[in-house]
Image (tube, coloured by chain):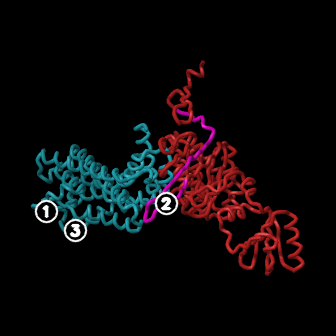
Chain colours: A cyan, B red
Amino acid sequence: MKITKILNDALIIGWIKSYPDFRRNPLTLILIATVGAIPLFFMLIFSGGGLIVHGLIGAMVSSATFIGVLAGIQDISWDRYVKIREMIVAMPVHPASYALGIALAPFLLSIPSLIFYGTLTAYLGFITLEATLWTILALIVAWAAMSAIGFMISTYLYKVSMMVLNNISTLLGFLFVFIPPVFYSETILGSLSWISVLIPTSNAANLIRAYMGLLPLSAETIIIRWVILIATTVAFVVLTSVKARWREN
Amino acid sequence: MRLLEEFTVYAHGLRTPYLLIKGGKRVSLSTNAVKSVDLVKVYHSREKVEALKGVNITIGRGELFTLLGPNGAGKTTFLRIISTQLMPTSGDARVLGYSVVDEPEEVRKHIAVVPQDVATYSNFTPWEYAYYFARLRGMPASEAKGISEKALKAVDLWELRNRMCQTLSGGERRRAIIASALSSNADVLMLDEPTSGLDAVARRGVWSALRNMVEAGKTILLTTHMMEEAEIVSDRLAIISKGSVIADGTLDEIKALSKEKYRVVVEGKFEKLSDFGEVSKLGDRNIVYVKTQEEALELLKTTLKMHLRAEASPVTLEDVFVKLVGGINNSENH
């Protein structure tokens, strides 16, 4: 199958999955923004504005990743449940298009909230043009990693009921976004700050902090962190593809 | 000479011959739309279940073929294998000449599937179903728009095309899904119990759409457990039971498998009914199967004399089906 067809189909599936929410359920967009806004609000209240930039970085990362992991689990399981997936399997659509499309939909939905938090960060003078580009890249890789984690979970837990999967995905979303140093700097963890590198959300958030000059990291450390972030994504994609079956046996 | 320059005919090994048109597109020369050969499917879950035990079915191009069987007979398994969703344990099937085992990508270019109990995205409209599924087939936007309009009109949903599925009735939602299959412009449509749960009016709307598609040259494989549906829409049908095909042919050929040609439904108590023919007891009613019209008339006269209510008619597909799958309970043999 041609790569252009694979990409085009991924865009169509991504659009199918996100367009109805854009048009008929814009509350979804507000909900995505709210995931980051709540901790941001408390940080603003309790720090008197001193930690707001950390909160904005956390809000951007949570916007790009929180529903990514949810969609990776819930959308695939839902499509299997309503049997739309069966229709797509029997079409000239590559499985990569389907996976990419499913992952793309929540990212498209998070774009308005990313623009909002990004604009706020720029307005407050925390970000340069170069840092903007690195931030976008870090957010994209973090989104890919979290989507891959979602796919892996939905693939390995394919016999689990939708209700349980919904709870697991929401719980994971919260765990990945609120527990690790996404809304706060990893320096707070002290000697345990290495944990931050292993988790895609906190790794991406602290890379962004480094590009904004909020976290002193050497060039080598930054490269290593990028490698780990990308390797985490690839590892979860490989783990998923080992188990996932487009056609059942 | 020009023909030879433009086309190449391949006929190697077991593959069905096909034309290779300039540009790499292949056109099958197979005369059958679907042909399964010794298709076997064994599920290994807690216990071994033989869902298909060597199924051989041939469906001609432009036919509406119905696979009829009780629940759990293997209909859905068969459909899922030939629609490339499920691998067979052994055997193979060809769709327009392409092997579902070895050439699933080719098969998928020519088929569209409506799975059993498929649900809709609640915030999607029928138009979006038809249009985006057409786009996924690789159609450009203008072509997808045209074919979506045709598909929605064929299932009588054009007026409701912009309503969200959550506001449509069950039948309308099912027709929206069928429209998405029709908009594929696929040569072979496979529908797994598409009318189950629909009311009589909605069912007829679906049947009408299916027959229109057959008229337009499409091949349709339909699975159902509804006899009326099979009788009305099918060109040919097969009855499958416990993973094996037990009958295959036109409606008349299937009905001819029964030695008894007439049925007499008798209401009320009549102890010597088995003297007339095979009796199937349904509570306070009995169906008596007789071989000739004369025997049916004789039974009718007898019941009238006894002031019992009775009604005679030719045997139905359901009668034959129940006999073939061994489902007559409380029967008494003549």
Residue B46 vs residue B270: left or right? left
Q: Please give the name of the residue rendered at 41% of the width and 68% of the height, measured from the top-left corner.
A: A163
Label 1 belongs to which residue?
A189
Q: Is residue A88 visible?
A: no
Quadrant holding the N terminus of chain B: top right
Closest to the camera, between mark 2 and mark 1, is: 2
Judge by depth and name the residue closer to the eye, B23 or B13: B13
User: What are the residue bounds of the magenta stretch?
Assistant: B25-53
Q: Earlier in the sequence, mark 3 or mark 1?
A: 3
Circle 2 Cα neighbour tier, 10 Å, few/some/many (<14 / 14–19 / ≥20): some
Please, which residue is most extreme toward the left here? A191
**SS at badge 2:** helix
**B198 magenta-colored:** no
Label 3 belongs to which residue?
A45
Judge by depth and name the residue closer to the eye, B285 or A90: B285
Q: Please give the name of the residue rendered at 80% of the width and 79% of the height, measured from the top-left corner.
A: B270
Name the amino acid type tagged 1.
Leu
Name the amino acid type tagged 3.
Ile
Closest to the camera, between mark 3 and mark 1, is: 1
Q: Within the image, what quadrant is residue A38 found in?
A: bottom left
Judge by depth and name the residue closer to the eye, A57 or B67: B67
